[in-house]
Image (cartoon, helix red, strand yellow):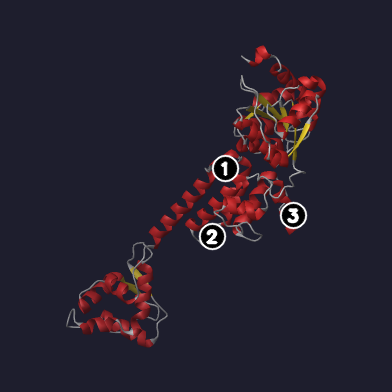
């Protein structure tokens, strides 16, 4: 080793017997952490002899020696005038910085989950918090934040587009997911993600069969039958000669509820709301409340829509149609866990605003009916963070029918023109 920097020195470093040394040094330097020594082994006799020659030792090292990096730097510099980093990069491959890579990956993962938690669809429907937690627990798709974000973006696009308007699943998938009619086929990652989200949203049992999955999609408006998907409405007096306007107007004038089909809402014909002051359409969750309103007001019933629990595609279609014609929508539902989730869904999917659905309204209702069943699983109410806190504290559900008299008084106020104009 007397001819520093000669090709002979470089060839000596490339001896196969030194390969375990350079591989171990490469691994340690690629850790991104400070390195002062490396432990080798077990080495066979030829490898121990090669290491002794390189370091200028007068005896063979142990089979598992610990080598100071400073001694190795001196030996390499004397052999070829280069650094240990240069040698291992040439013989093994480029050095990495795994510590920095881990920090970058952790930052990317944290950014991904923060993006998911802050997504507008997730914020609008707090019931999806369990779904986002399950996504985080499942980890990254193929270890890639980019692939995971792309998959979640597709799933969120589907959730934002639901409930569907009675489309077959392939047609809905093609419309929402860039023309890919098979994107939501059974077994695809996007389909599985969306179904898990619907389970969290509806607080439903996970589907165990193809029939269960079809039922869950159907609940979200996929392939609804145009005639069996209906919504109840009363007091609507639109102008126009289209079939929808004629049906709702005739029922309102008779003091009856109209059961409107998805087919009628898809092809309403000429339809417009009366001009003048912005019409207010109240929305209730339970048909019994609509029945009480018709019993009290008859042909004078103000505009009222009933979702009959979770709104189907017909209900959402009607509410969007009314909003498109400048109606102000006001929603009320049960004060229980599912009622809060339904309210959040209606508020997210339509321009509706809550009606008597604050924490103060709940406390007033509990004061009148201090006994009742448990509210069940509670999720946040986006319009009033105090509401579910109050419900958890009292532990009582108040169904809509128990405060129907309060709601009917609001509707009575709506029938008084002088009050409506204020």
Left or right, 67 with respect to 344, comes to: left
Q: Nearer the viewer, mark 2 or mark 1?
A: 1
In the image, residue 355 above or below residue 172: above
| Residue under label 3 | 212
- Cα separation, mark 2 vs mark 1, equals 21 Å
Q: Secondary structure at mark 2?
A: loop
In the image as oriented, which residue stretches furthest toward the top? Answer: 418
Evaluate whether residue 165 shows in this view: yes
Left or right, 78 with respect to 312, comes to: left
Evaluate whether residue 341 shows in this view: no
| Residue under label 2 | 141
- Cα separation, mark 2 vs mark 3, equals 26 Å
Q: Nearer the viewer, residue 151 or 65?
A: 151
Residue drawn at (32%, 86%), measured in percent from left and top? 49
For the C terminus, give its image quadrant: top right
In the image as oriented, which residue stretches furthest toward the left? Answer: 3
Question: What's the mark number on residue 284?
Answer: none
Query: Around disc 2, counting alpha carbons within 10 Å, would you say few (fewer than 14), some (14 to 19), or many (20 or more)?
Result: some
Residue 393, by quadrant, is top right
Residue 299, by quadrant, is top right
Query: Around disc 3, counting alpha carbons within 10 Å, would you say few (fewer than 14), some (14 to 19), or many (20 or more)?
Result: few
| Residue under label 1 | 121
First-in-chain label (2 vs 3): 2
């Amino acid at each position: 080793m007397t001819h520093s920097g000669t090709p002979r020195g470089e060839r000596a470093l490339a001896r196969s017997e030194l390969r375990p040394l350079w591989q171990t040094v490469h691994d340690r330097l690629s850790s991104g952490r400070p390195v002062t020594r490396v432990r080798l082994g077990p080495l066979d006799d030829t490898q121990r002899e090669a290491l002794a020659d390189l370091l200028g030792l007068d005896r063979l090292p142990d089979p598992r020696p610990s080598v100071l990096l400073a001694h190795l730097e001196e030996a390499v510099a004397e052999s070829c005038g280069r650094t240990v980093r240069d040698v291992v990069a040439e013989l093994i491959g480029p050095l990495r910085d795994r510590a920095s890579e881990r920090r970058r990956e952790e930052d990317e993962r944290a950014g991904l989950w923060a993006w998911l938690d802050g997504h507008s669809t997730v914020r609008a429907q707090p019931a999806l918090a369990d779904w986002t937690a399950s996504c985080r627990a499942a980890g990254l798709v193929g270890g890639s934040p980019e692939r995971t974000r792309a998959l979640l973006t597709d799933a969120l696009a589907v959730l934002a587009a639901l409930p569907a308007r009675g489309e077959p699943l392939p047609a809905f998938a093609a419309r929402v997911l860039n023309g890919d009619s098979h994107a939501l086929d059974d077994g695809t990652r996007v389909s599985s993600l969306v179904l898990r989200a619907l389970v969290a949203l509806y607080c439903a049992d996970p589907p165990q069969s193809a029939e269960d999955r079809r039922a869950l999609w159907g609940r979200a408006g996929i392939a609804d039958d145009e005639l069996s998907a209906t919504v109840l409405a009363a007091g609507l007096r639109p102008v126009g000669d289209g079939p929808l306007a004629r049906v709702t107007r005739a029922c309102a004038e008779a003091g009856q509820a109209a059961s409107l089909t998805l087919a009628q809402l898809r092809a309403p014909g000429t339809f417009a709301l009366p001009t003048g002051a912005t019409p207010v359409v109240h929305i209730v969750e339970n048909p019994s409340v609509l029945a009480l309103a018709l019993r009290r007001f008859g042909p004078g019933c103000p505009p009222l829509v009933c979702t009959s629990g979770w709104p189907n595609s017909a209900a959402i279609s009607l509410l969007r149609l009314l909003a498109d014609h400048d109606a102000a929508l006001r929603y009320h539902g049960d004060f229980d866990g599912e009622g809060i989730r339904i309210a959040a869904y209606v508020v997210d999917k339509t321009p509706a605003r809550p009606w008597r659905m604050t924490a103060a309204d709940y406390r007033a209702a509990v004061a009148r009916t201090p006994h009742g069943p448990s509210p069940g699983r509670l999720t946040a109410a986006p319009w009033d963070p105090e509401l579910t806190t109050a419900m958890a504290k009292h532990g009582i559900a108040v169904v809509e029918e128990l405060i129907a008299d309060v709601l009917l008084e609001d509707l009575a106020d709506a029938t008084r023109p002088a009050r409506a104009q204020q």
